[in-house]
Amino acid sequence: MKYKLAIFDFDGTLADSFPWAASVVNQYADRYRFKRIEPADHAALRNYDARKLMQHLGVRMWKVPGMARDVRKRMAQEIDKIPLFPGVSEMLQALVDQGLMLAVVSSNSEANVRAVLGPQNTAHFTLFNCGASVFGKAPKLKSVMKKCRMSPETVILIGDEIRDAHAAHKVGIDFGAVTWGYTNPEALLALHPHEIFESVEEIAAKLGRSQPL
């Protein structure tokens, strides 16, 4: 089989958190003194990687950890506003039935991830490694692989952001891009991902083809 471990990003990949994020971002813009985002800006900004987005908005790097903690705390208080994308539960069940090990690496908190997934979906995951800094996913990916005893060629990271692709490349694993998340599909396709998923159902279908009959 090609993949033994599928590592998932969370926000924009499993959870449809963009509408919630868009509804609160300007409150944090005012609090942390960066440029406000108007609805007309969304399409262009979805082409940016995290570093370019921060530069465009004037986000100071030293403020990011505190802001991230604030956002996670706010999301925990409003967790009922964060749904899974349709079909996620069925897709996760199908991957487990096909024999894949599952993990989550996310910038969000583990408590938020578990709350949105719910107990039944949470049980499908072997490992959660959450609370990654903006550019800190690579060490967490490496830690997950070590704990799961997986070599890089057997692992795929599934995510929706340019920084996910860069993190996967940094640790030598494949990257699977989803087209329904935070980043415009065209920006992800320019990175030549190993897999492209245009629907949640395609994840199980494509990864399933890499498994033995």
Image: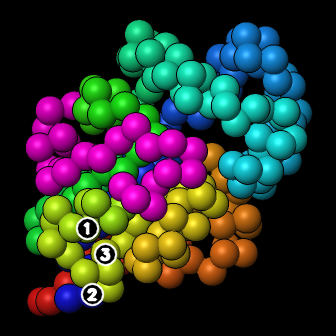
Q: Is residue 127 above or below residue 101?
A: above
Residue at horizontal 69 percent and vertical 49 percent from the top: 50
Q: Earlier in the sequence, mark 1 or mark 3?
A: 1
Front position among marks 2 and 1: 1
Q: Position of residue 59 (x, y in %)?
A: 77, 32
Badge 2 local density, few (<14 within 10 Å), some, or many (20+)? some
Residue 119 drawn in magenta: yes
Badge 1 local density, few (<14 within 10 Å), some, or many (20+)? many
| In front of the other: 161 or 55 | 55
Q: Amino acid at mark 1?
A: Met
Residue 109 picture quarter: top left
Badge 3 local density, few (<14 within 10 Å), some, or many (20+)? many
Q: Amino acid at mark 3?
A: Val
Give the labeled residue for mark 2.
2
Front position among marks 3 and 2: 3
The alpha-carbon separation of the residues under discs 3 and 2 comes to 8 Å
Residue 155 horizontal side relative to residue 100, left or right? right
Q: Position of residue 34 (x, y in %)?
A: 82, 24
Residue at horizontal 66 percent and vertical 75 percent from the top: 191
Q: Earlier in the sequence, mark 2 or mark 1?
A: 2
Give the labeled residue for mark 3.
155
Residue at horizontal 30 percent and vertical 47 percent from the top: 129
Task: Give the structural element (helix, strand or loop) at label 1.
Answer: helix
Q: Amino acid at mark 2?
A: Lys
Residue 127 horizontal side relative to residue 182, left or right? left
Q: Are marks 1 and 3 in contact (CB under 8 Å)?
A: yes
Give the labeled residue for mark 1.
145
The span picked out in magenta is 118-140
Task: Give the structural element (helix, strand or loop) at label 3.
Answer: strand
